Image: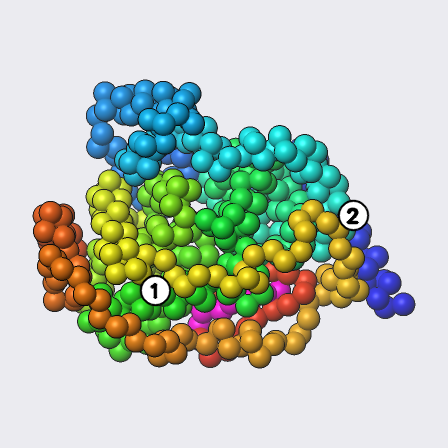
Amino acid sequence: MDDELTISYAREERKAIFERYDKGKSADSCIDPWDDPANLIYQQIDKYGFIYDERIQRQQKTDHCCIDSQLEKERKWIYMLRRWNKKDTVEKLRSRVFKGIPNNLRSAAWLKLLNVEKTIAENVGVYKRMLELAREFSTEVRQIDFDVNRQFREHVHYRERYSVKQQALFNVLTAYSMYNRELGYCQGMAGVAGVLLMYMDDEQAFWALNTFMTDSKYAMHGLYIEDFPKLMRLLSHHDKILEKFMPKLRKHLMKHKLESMYYSVKWFFVLFVEKVPFSLCLRIWDIYMVDGERVVVAMAFTILRLHRTKLLKMKDMDLMTDFLLIQLHKDFGYDDDFVIRAVEQSMVDLKRIKMDLPPPPLTHEFPQNSLGVCIECKTESKGGRSRNEISENELLTAEPRIGQEEAIAPAAVTNSLYDADYNFVEEDNMELYQSIDSLASSPAISRSSSESSIESSERSSECTRL
């Protein structure tokens, strides 16, 4: 009887949440003052839609490209988009992406890069059907509703409760929780879907999100499932890179008990969203859609490479964590073009010694069940309850990875230069890294699912599967 009451309550709660999103923002909506910043007077909106006012002091970065140069870049991209599958477009695509996609053409470019329109044509009506099933069966509605209202609170399209984009984000995440039942929902997915929705409608974002999760180039399914296997591979690989290229910085971080999990989890889990300036984050996403996780590995390395001098001067773990996770979001210290050139060089350096990618994924990191199949939930899931048990494997994967892997054998690299921290520098690119050196003078992750939770009381950073 208790189970029946619990399931009945969960059903009513799910229905009420969906009704609030269906109604949207209206005069009779019951919205808490914190949920709706309509009474605040904003003074400025950047070209990406983020709001700035007297409460949030951020230095606005101006575009250094002249108008003529920007118009020329747009002209080239318009021509490419019209000839997407032509040989000359394919040959020039990667180099043009590294130079930056014009923001007003980013929507069209992302749809092409992720092959979204073709996917929609092959799956007519599926998104709508998944959304209908979510209304009846989704066990993730409560957590998704909670996370939607926390996402991009400074963005003009997400700031108001039950706004059009909040509705779209809620719909995409609940529908996907039904389409990929093996994954369900994980908190990091809200940030990823939220960025996609800035450049796509809800059905397009749904299929773009699915491409990120299931395509082998991105394979983000393994990033969010139980035990976070891909996240663990990325963390371990990041540690190896630091040990090989920047042992002095690595030793300094460990001396002050700053393990890589404390800062890099947030980088990998949300693809640097709200961890670096948004304009730079978009540039990384552009490259990610072409090169996959190589750019994620290289960007994490580049952040520390660019800022190692400043980090070496810091003597406090909290100060370093704040710098890497908060201060760099406000001001990265370098313009976007410079950072992308450094990232590109890092990708070359890592590929030269076969460290541009982490170890290959295991089979279970990809979906094992058919997508879009409605599977009967357990009673605990129907009632919205989480299991209390923590598996031995979950605890194991939450432990620090340092020292658990074999040391990397020195690689034989010819015609190269190295700095004091064993940073590989091509002679042709020495000027770039001389410029870098001259200028470069606790987080939580939630895995929201009704089936499991991960907790670690031994560190200030958590990985939690609700």
Mark 2 residue element: helix
User: Which mark's residue is nearer the viewer, 1 or 2?
Assistant: 1
Give the crowd class for mark 1: few <14, some 14-19, many >=20 residues within 10 Å.
many
| Residue at image mark 1 | 238
Give the crowd class for mark 2: few <14, some 14-19, many >=20 residues within 10 Å.
few
Q: How many numbered discs, if any?
A: 2
Q: Is residue 413 visible?
A: yes
Among the 4 quarters of the image, the one containing residue 446: bottom right
Colouring of the image: rainbow
Give the residue displayed 42% in from the left and 26% down from the top.
84
Among the 4 quarters of the image, the one containing residue 325: bottom left
Give the residue displayed 75% in from the left and 55% down from the top.
375
Q: Is residue 465 magenta?
A: yes
Tell me where the magenta segment starts and ends, as one range. 460-466
**Residue 306 appears at what percent x and percent y?**
21, 55
C-alpha distance separating marks 1 and 2: 42 Å
| Quadrant for the N terminus in the image | bottom right
| Residue at image mark 2 | 136
| Quadrant for the C terminus in the image | bottom right
Q: Is residue 400 left or right of residue 126?
A: left
> Which labelled disc corresponds to residue 301?
none
User: In the rendered structure, are the residues bearing label 1 and label 2 in contact, judged by CB atoms less than 8 Å apart?
Assistant: no
Among the 4 quarters of the image, the one containing residue 359: bottom left
Q: Is residue 123 left or right of residue 12?
A: left
